[in-house]
Amino acid sequence: MNATVPGLGPYRPRRPGARPRSGLNREGIMTQSPQILQTIESHILELQKLHPAASGDFTGLLNDITFAAKIVSREVTKAGLVDILGATGESNVQGETVQKLDDYANAVFLKCLGTRGQVCIMGSEEMADPIFNDAGPGSHNYVVIFDPLDGSSNIDANVSVGTIFGIWKRRSLLSKVGPADLLQPGRQLVASGYVIYGSSTMLVYTAGHGVHGFTLDPSIGEFLLSHENITTPFEGPIYSVNEGNEPKWSPAVVETVRQLKHGRSGVGGKKVAGKTSRYIGSLVADFHRNLLYGGVFLYPPTTEKPGGKLRLMCEAAPLALVAENAGGYASDGKGPILDVAPDQLHMRVPLYIGSRGDVMWIETMLSGTKGGSC
Ligand code: AHM
Ligand code: MG
């Protein structure tokens, strides 16, 4: 079910040469009503109306994320103009070089999420430990885990990067907030989404009533509904994987990718065509493209990273919820990503995500190999 206001259509860019939407004729006289666009704030408010007992905390939290995304978008788009590019020289908790914009995006999300008293735990890919903020049961009801700027190694080349976020409900209703509140599986997510900072900035989110995409109109500083109720094809024409890792994959993964590329024989011996390859190396951008066009993204285990590279809580699980709510699927090669129980904030997993039919076929190929482990 989707939560649009009756009578308000999705945002559609104007065709070149089409009449201006203002409804003014050449003499400046109003001849038609202006098209009404739906902002993300009004969309979120409509969602809140579906839950009459809602306190507004969750709505406020989604609005905080939207606001943070606008600020980060502003910095990402002007990154080429100011001296903000380049690594700080420090390493994050996984030993990877931290880019300056990572630091900035992290600080923005922490600042925006921490001020209204709805959040009891904030965890970020950029911080070794989560931040606990507990004023006792009854308040601070949400846990937010995010990757503030995923794909940041691409920033210097002006390639799309993104933010990924997941929101869980606090479990401890009568006691102090603790690890059980933090380490929840993706199945318990109440909302998740991502922001892609690309040729335009888009925010895509799901809170259980479909997956909806909003495009930032920089001239008015608003995210406007542009992709209502996104659904992904059951099978798609694209596979996305870093094929440079092939020497480090298990034989099962090598064979799986070979068949994705060359095709295979399907049910009743019917030939299933090979797919085309697209790989940006920026998870949000690769995921977003495949969500719209259909296909599958793979980050299998390698001999160097036997547990996979991508993080369960701030990358895989939030995107898995988006995929499932759009009709797709995400697997660690053995079962649903959403059912994987985290043992720590920065736990990594193998990831196969995208069109449901494609991911299920991969799961079958890898069954008995511990998700494609080497
Ligand atoms: P990051 O969180 O440090 O930016 O790393 C995650 C990124 C993903 O965006 C992308 O899918 C993956 O790393 C690419 O890895 P590789 O360069 O090994 O193909
Ligand atoms: Mg990341």
Image (cartoon, helix red, strand yellow):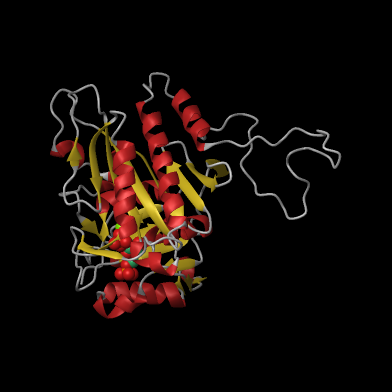
Left-right relation of 360 to 273: left
Residue closest to the far right: 27
Residue displayed at 21% across by 62% down: 90
Q: Is residue 331 above or below residue 46?
A: below
Q: Is residue 255 above or below residue 153?
A: below
Q: Is residue 329 above or below residue 63?
A: below
Q: In which quadrant of the rendered view does residue 64 lie?
A: top left
Left-right relation of 17 to 281: right
Residue displayed at 43% across by 40% down: 66
Between 252 and 112, the residue placed more toward the observer is 112
Q: Quadrant of ligand 2?
A: bottom left
Between 108 and 243, the residue placed more toward the observer is 108
Left-right relation of 364 to 15: left
* Position of residue 77 measured from the top left corner of the image (x, y, whole percent): 47, 56
**Residue 41 visible to the viewer:** yes
Q: In which quadrant of the rendered view does residue 197 lie?
A: bottom left
* Position of residue 348 measured from the top left corner of the image (x, y, whole percent): 22, 58
* Position of residue 108 measured from the top left corner of the image (x, y, whole percent): 33, 45
Q: Quadrant of the C terminus?
A: bottom left
Residue closest to the far top: 53
* Position of residue 210 measured from the top left corner of the image (x, y, whole percent): 47, 40
